[in-house]
Image: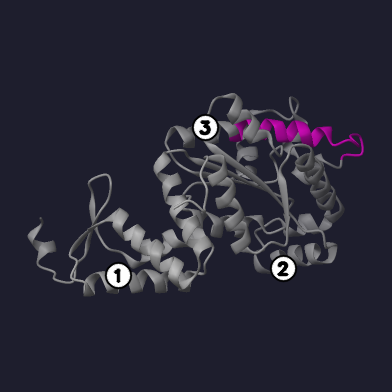
Amino acid sequence: MDPVLSSDTNLLLVHNRYGTSLPFSVEMLANSLLVTGIQPPDAYAIASRLGTSLRLEGHSEIESERVAARAGDLLEALVGAAEAGRYRAWRRFRHLGRPLVLCLLGAPGVGKSSLATSLAARLGIHRVVPTEAVREILRSVVGKNLLPELHLPAHEAVTSPRDPFGNGFLRQAQAVSNAATAVAERSVAEGRHVLLVGAHLVPGGMRQELRQRGSPAVVVEMLLTLEDERLHRARLLRRVRSDPAMPGVRHLQHFGAVRALQDKLGELARSNGVVAHEGATEKLLVEWIVDHTLAGAGLSPEAT
């Protein structure tokens, strides 16, 4: 052992399953507990309490699986059996080596971007890809004469007067979905989780495409909606005031088209078995995503 490390009597080394040893970190353990849906202060309190207990018991070295088992027990005692079961099952999922491809869909202004950031942190996803960025890349290589719909915002593609059935949006979404699938496959090949967020995917398309390609990924798709028109408009207005760089003004000017896009996404979601969430809290969404990921991997949060 490194003499510099061994000279610190308060240092607690944690040995993981890959043979690496790192100092016990309250922050890292707290972050891993967020997948249960509990609030960050509660996760930090549990992790801090466990660290104190381990040191008081005289531990200087410990296996990571033992730390996780103790964390699960403490979580069950202080919060509940459901959260503890979800935490234990999620750790088993991580050890399976099956990456998660999470697709968060929805029209502008429903809260996708801010929610994606918090979900990524809770689920340990380090790769977040906006579908708007995928569309911008495609625009640079696919000419307007070849696929004019690709050069329109999603809400304009779905409301063209010459295209009352939204086929232009479908063509745009299919092109973006194909490129996004390649991004997802690359992440899966690297063994990384990825979160795709935006309005430019065909609901259900990612799951079907990756399944056909024999991908080992677990694909979870969800649609965020905001049925209250006044609240939807107010959120877009708040975006204009808080972040002028965002295209909130354009969305407000085309609010009817934004609402039509939400309707189209809802129609596609219903026909392709993608669940729509209206007004769900972050805790409930985390629980839903984790439970559906576990189900897709053949695991159960109730198992111990």
**SS of the residue under disc 3:** helix
Task: Report, in whole angstroms, how far the alpha carbon at label 2 lies from the one at label 3.
Answer: 36 Å
Residue at the image position 82 percent from the left and 41 percent from the top: 158
Q: Specify whether residue 20 is in view.
A: yes
Q: What residue is disc 3 on?
A: 185
Q: Residues within 10 Å of mark 2 (few under 14, many from 20)?
A: few
Residue at x 22%, y 46% (from the top left corner): 19
Q: Nearer the viewer, residue 229 or 301?
A: 301
- 293 lies above or below 48: above
Q: Nearer the viewer, residue 277 or 246?
A: 277
Q: CA distance from mark 1 to mark 2?
A: 42 Å
Find residue 11 and report its image quarter.
bottom left
Residue at 69% across, 39% down: 201
**Element under label 1?**
helix
Viewer-closest of 207 and 86: 86
Label 1 sits on residue = 51
Q: Tell me whether circle 3 and circle 1 mark residues in contact (CB < 8 Å).
A: no
In this rendering, position of residue 255 left or right of residue 143: right
Note whether residue 121 is visible. no
Q: Callout 1 environment at 10 Å: few (<14), some (14 to 19), or many (20+)?
A: many
> Which picture quadrant has residue 231?
bottom right
Start-end of magenta stretch: 160-180
Q: Earlier in the sequence, mark 3 or mark 1?
A: 1
Label 3 is placed on what type of residue? Glu
Circles 1 and 2: CB atoms closer than 8 Å: no
Q: Which of the labelled discs sits on residue 238, or is there none?
A: 2
Q: Amino acid at mark 1?
A: Gly
